[in-house]
Amino acid sequence: MSASNKALVDPEKLDRLAQVAVSVGLGLQEGQDLVMTAPIVAAPLARRIAEHAYKAGAGIVTTLFSDEELTLARYRYAPDFSFDRATGWLYDGIAKAFSENAARLAIYAEDPMLLANEDPDKVGRANKANSIAYTPVREKITGFDINWTILSYPNPTWAKKIFPNDDEDTAVKKLADAIFAATRVDQADPVAAWKTHNANLHRKTAQLNGQRFHALHFTGPGTDLTVGLADGHEWKGGASLAKNGTTCNPNLPSEEVFTTPHAMRVDGYVRSTKPLSHQGTLIDGIEMRFKAGKIIEARATRGEQVLLKVLDTDEGSRRLGEVALVPHSSPISKSGLLFYNTLYDENAACHIALGQCYSDCFIDGAKLTVEEITARGGNRSFIHIDWMIGSGEIDVDGLDASGNRTAVMRKGEWV
Amino acid sequence: MSASNKALVDPEKLDRLAQVAVSVGLGLQEGQDLVMTAPIVAAPLARRIAEHAYKAGAGIVTTLFSDEELTLARYRYAPDFSFDRATGWLYDGIAKAFSENAARLAIYAEDPMLLANEDPDKVGRANKANSIAYTPVREKITGFDINWTILSYPNPTWAKKIFPNDDEDTAVKKLADAIFAATRVDQADPVAAWKTHNANLHRKTAQLNGQRFHALHFTGPGTDLTVGLADGHEWKGGASLAKNGTTCNPNLPSEEVFTTPHAMRVDGYVRSTKPLSHQGTLIDGIEMRFKAGKIIEARATRGEQVLLKVLDTDEGSRRLGEVALVPHSSPISKSGLLFYNTLYDENAACHIALGQCYSDCFIDGAKLTVEEITARGGNRSFIHIDWMIGSGEIDVDGLDASGNRTAVMRKGEWV
Ligand SMILES: [Zn+2]
Ligand SMILES: [Zn+2]
Ligand SMILES: [Zn+2]
Ligand SMILES: [Zn+2]
C-alpha cells in the first residue's frame, strides 16, 4: 500500500466500518479470540478491526495476511506438483481455533484479475486442492459453529477494475465510498440502520417460510430453471444465530434472503447475468443445464476451463447448495456498478451457489446430522460458489407440490 | 512500507540475499514446503525468498506476516486476561508442517523498542504464555528436525534505533549495507564465501571438540564465571546437518561456535557487555550470579522487570542452554555497530543463553532421548534467550576435570 493510498480512504469512516464489523458483523463476545484473514493492502482496516475487537473484549486477534505478489510467485516459479498441494496444517489450525470458539473475520478485497494470465490448469488444480484441505474450516463456517463475517476494503487493483476510466486514486475513493454506503457506515447511526435492515430481511424470510414452496421457477433471457427446495428448508437473511449463541451478520453488505435447494430436484437451463470473479479468474457468460439436480451441460464465454475444473471438484460440485433472492432495486444493484467481487455482486442479484449447503438453512438445522441433511436434499461439497442469475428481466414463481404457482418476483422485484 | 523505502534497499543485493537465504541458509530441498515468518515491512524480501524457494523446487511457501501496529493494538486495548493467552492452534499447525518436513525461515527485523512503553507485567506474561504455547515449534527447531534459518531486513524503525543521528532513509541504507556485508551478499560469489567461512568455523569446532574441556572460565570486568560443559557436548558452528538430511546455516550471519553447558555446573558472576533486545523490550546492564548452574541473583539497569519475568518462566529458565565463543575481531563486531537485534549482536560477542539447549550440540545428539540429554547436563526450558558477555576485555580459559588450564581467548581473541 502506498502512503498516498492511506489518505484516500476516509479514516473516520474506515474506523466506523471496523466498529460495524466487530459489533454488527461478528457480534464479538467478551473473551472470544478472533482469526482474521486479510490481504496486506488491507492492513489499515485490519488494524482498526483489531483495536475494536480488543475493546470489545477479544482475547487474541490473529491476522493471517495474504499478498498478491506472493500468490503470483507460486504460479510463476513453483514446480508443477505444487498445484496439487495445499496448506492443510494451517487450515487444521484455524479449525482448531474455531473449535475453541474463536470468531472469524475475512477481509475480501482481491484483485479479481490476479490470475487472469496464469495457466488455467494450474489455477483449477490449486483451487481444488485448496478446497479439499479447507474442509474442516468450511464445515465450521457453513455450519455456523461460530460467529463470522466477511467485508471488503478498497484495494487499488480491484478499484481500477471497477472504475477503469478513473485514475487509481479516484478509483480507490469511489470504491471506498461504495463500500461505506453498502455497509451503511455513511449513515448517522450505522448500528441502528443495520437493525432496521435486519428486521426488513427477517420479515421477508418469515413470509417465505410461511409459504413453504416446494420449488422456485426462474424465467428470463436464457433462463428457464426450476429449483426444488429442500424438505424442511428454512429461509434466512441478515442476522444469523450461530451455534455458540452469538448473533452475527455473516456478510457486510447483505441484501439477500436465501435457503437450501433440493440437490436432486433442479431442472432446466440458466444463464449468468453478471461475471463471476473466482479466486483471481473471471468467469463470464455461464450457461448451464440441470437434470434431476445435476449439471449436465456447462459452458462459459470466458474462464470456461477454470469453471469446468470447479465442476469436477467432487460429486457435490455439480449440484446446488444455495438459492438466494435479491430484488433488482437493492441499493448495491442500484449503484449500477459491477464489482467483480462476489460479496458485492451476489447482493445485487438473485443467485445460486454450486456445492455445499448451509445446515443453518433447515428448520432446527443445528440439531441435524449430516445424514439427515442429505436425506432432506441438502448438498455436500468441498466448494461453495455463488453466481448471479438475477436481473431486471427475471421473474420468479413459487410452486407447491402440485405445481400451483404464486408470483414471487416480477421483473426482478418482489411482487 | 513506504514506496520510497523500497528503492532505498538495493534490489539486486536484496535478490542475492534471498538467494543466499534459500540455498545457503535453508539448503532447501526439492519438494519441501516452506513456512516463513516476516513483519509486513519485510514483504519485499519475503517475496524474493518465495520466488527463489519455488525456483529451488518448493511445494508451497506460506508466509505468516506480523505487524507492529497489530502487536501494539493488543497491548493498548486488550482486556487483562489476553496477556495470559497465546495462539497455540497456530503453533500446533506450524509444528505439524515441520513434522511433514516443511523448512522454516524467519525474517527477524523487529523494532527493538516496540514495547518499550508498554506495561512490563503484561509484556512478561504475554512472553511467558507465548513461550509455553510455542513449545512444539521450538522443540522441532532446537532439535534440528528440519532445516531452518533466520535473517534480517532493514526495517525503518529498527534502522533509526541503530543510527539515531541519521534521517530515516540514510539509516535504512546504512542498515541494508550492514546486512548485505554481514551475510556476504556484497561479495562477488556469496555462496563460495559462505563455503570458506563454514570451513573456517568447522576447523575451530574440530579443535575445540578435540580439546574436550570440562569447563570454560570467563574473566573480565564484572565477570568471573565458570561454565561447565555438558558430558558428551559437541561444538557446532556454521552449517548444520538437520535430521531430515539437509545442511542448513541456521543464522545469517553466523560467526559463533557454540556448545551445550552443563545445567548443574555454572558458578560465579557475569555482566552483560551489550544490551539485549527481547521481544520489543530493551534489557541492559544485566548482572547475574550462578550457583551450581542456577541463577541465584539477577538484576538489570533497564528492563529488569521483564528480565525477572523471563527467569520465572519455568525451572529451566534460570539455567544455561548454550555457551558461544565469538572473537572480538569478528566482522560484525568490527563494524562497531550495536544492532539491538540478537541475530546480529550475538554474532559480535561471546554469549550465553538462558533456557533450552540444542540437542544437536551433543555427540550423536540426534539419537539421544530427552532423558539422556538431561542426564548429560542438557537444560530444558520454554525459552532460549542469548545475551552477550564478550568484549575486547574478556579472557577465556578451558579447564579439564582436574582444573588444568588452557588459554582459549585473550582480550577477546582466539589464542
Ligand atoms: Zn448467497
Ligand atoms: Zn453463498
Ligand atoms: Zn548463539
Ligand atoms: Zn542461542
Image (cartoon, coloured by chain):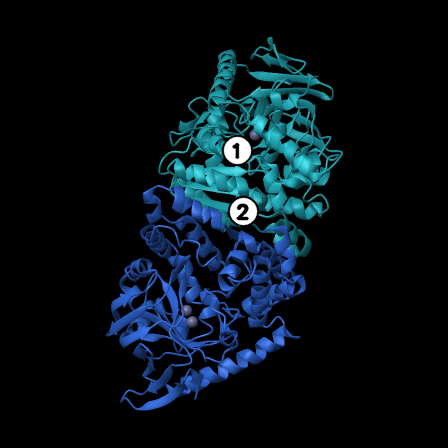
Chain colours: A blue, B cyan
N-term-proximal mark, 2 vs 1: 1
Residue B295: x %, y % from top left: 66, 30
Local crowd size for mark 1, using a 10 Å CA cut-off: few (<14), some (14–19), many (≥20):
few
What residue is at 46 percent from the left and 74 percent from the top? A348
Which dot marks residue B65?
A: 2
Look at the image and tell me whether residue B307 can be seen.
no
What percent of the width, then of the height, locates residue B221? Answer: 74, 19
The image shows residue A326, relative to residue B116, as above or below, that is below
Left or right relative to A392: residue B222: right
Query: Could you tell me the amino acid type at mark 1?
Result: Glu
Q: Nearer the viewer, residue A387 or B281?
A: A387
Label 2, label 1: how far apart the Cα atoms are: 23 Å
Residue identified by numbered label 1 = B12
Is A191 situated above or below B364?
Answer: below
Q: Is B182 situated left or right of B282 in this image?
A: left
Q: Name the residue nearer the viewer: A372 or A272.
A: A272
- Disc 1, SS: helix
Residue B26 placement (x, y as % from top left): 45, 32
Regarding residue A123, the answer to whether it shows in the image is yes
Three-letter residue code for mark 2: Phe
Q: Quadrant of ligand 1?
A: bottom left
Mark on residue A100?
none
**Secondary element at image label 2:** strand
Disc 2 crowd, CA 10 A, few/some/many (<14, 14-19, 20+): many
| Subunit under mark 2 | B
- The residue sitting at 56% across, 12% down in the picture is B400
Task: Please name the residue shown 52% across and 26% down the image.
Answer: B377
Rendered image quadrant of residue A50: bottom right
The percent position of residue A63, horizontal first and vertical second, equals 54, 53
Q: Nearer the viewer, residue A154 or B240?
A: A154
Q: Chain of mark 1?
A: B
